[in-house]
Image (cartoon, rainbow, N blue to C red):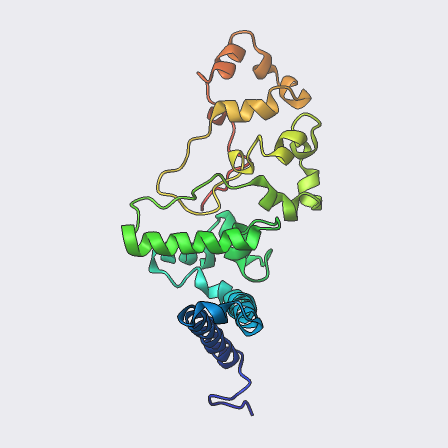
């Protein structure tokens, strides 16, 4: 039988107490600093004052940050969906009929948990800190300037986030362009974005047209491309290279996800 009540061992209850503890420690730090400032100058140079400052400036804030991080990481799976602004993205991700990259990763459990956080957090030393700062920025915009008409990522999505999981995967290595000696360095460096060939992770109102230059920068110099007679036809080739004739007039998109 699961114990209930304010002192139960339920995870949500424990997190509630950790949150309360963090608030109490933060208030304690403020009280100590005010107490030091309120004392006379002679006392402020005593050993007692220095110990008080160490507790108020370092020990209590550090404990508060640690406890806040524990609660923050526990709430990550639902925090992204708590704001109604994100409802369309969350709904699409959980839609079993959706074919967007986010939905595929969620439905197939390619990422077992904290899916939003896993893809939108950098893997560098400051990744978690940057994610938290980004979250605060979103909250500030929400309450101060309101929800923007068009919600979009503030910076290009880094290839490193995709490659962190995919670069050593068998499926990734089977794609000849991924391992092409001319293309692979550009993919690894981020010079060519994964999303230039792969569909957007989330639904968008207007589908970005496929640039012919995007196709040709990978395919134009490949042997398989040159083996196709039409590609080397003296009349047609200039039109292909100029974009006058679209690749998609003959080819279905092999990279972009097609919705049923």
From the top left corner, tell me how far across and down residue 153 is, in percent. Answer: 43, 44
Q: Nearer the viewer, residue 98 or 79?
A: 79
* Residue 97 seen anywhere in this rendered image of the structure: no
Observer-nearest residue: 82 or 183? Answer: 82
Question: For residue 227, what is the image quadrant?
Answer: top right
Q: What residue is at 60 percent from the left and 42 percent from the top?
A: 160
In percent of width and height, residue 253 lies at 51, 34
Asked whether residue 52 is in view, the answer is yes
Q: Nearer the viewer, residue 78 or 181?
A: 78
104 versus 68 height, above or below: above
Q: Residue at x 29, y 53 (%)?
A: 144
Q: Residue furthest top?
A: 234
What percent of the width, then of the height, locates residue 208?
A: 41, 34
Q: How many marks?
A: 0
In the rendering, at what x and y percent does residue 176 appear? 68, 32
Q: Is residue 178 above or below residue 154?
A: above
Q: Quadrant of the N terminus?
A: bottom right
């Amino acid at each position: 039988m699961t114990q209930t009540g304010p002192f139960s061992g339920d995870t949500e209850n424990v997190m509630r107490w950790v949150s309360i503890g963090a608030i109490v420690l933060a208030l304690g730090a403020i009280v100590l600093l005010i107490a030091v400032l309120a004392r006379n100058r002679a006392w402020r140079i005593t050993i007692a004052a220095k110990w008080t400052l160490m507790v108020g400036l370092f020990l209590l804030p550090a404990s508060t940050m640690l406890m806040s991080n524990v609660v923050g990481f526990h709430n990550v799976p639902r925090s992204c969906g708590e704001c109604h602004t994100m409802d369309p993205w969350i709904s699409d991700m959980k839609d079993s009929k959706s074919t967007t990259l986010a939905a595929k990763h969620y439905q197939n459990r390619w990422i077992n948990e904290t899916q939003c956080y896993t893809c939108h957090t950098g893997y560098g030393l400051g990744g978690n800190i940057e994610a938290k700062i980004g979250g605060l920025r979103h909250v500030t915009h929400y309450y101060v300037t309101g929800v923007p008409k068009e919600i979009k990522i503030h910076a290009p999505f880094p290839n490193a986030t995709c490659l962190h999981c995919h670069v050593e995967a068998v499926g990734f290595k089977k794609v000849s362009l991924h391992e092409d000696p001319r293309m692979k360095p550009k993919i690894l460096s981020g010079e060519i974005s994964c999303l230039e060939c792969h569909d957007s992770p989330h639904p968008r109102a207007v589908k970005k047209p496929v640039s012919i230059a995007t196709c040709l920068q990978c395919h134009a110099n490949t042997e398989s491309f040159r083996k196709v007679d039409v590609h080397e036809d003296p009349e047609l080739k200039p039109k292909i290279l100029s974009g006058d004739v679209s690749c998609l007039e003959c080819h279905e998109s092999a990279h972009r996800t097609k919705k049923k």
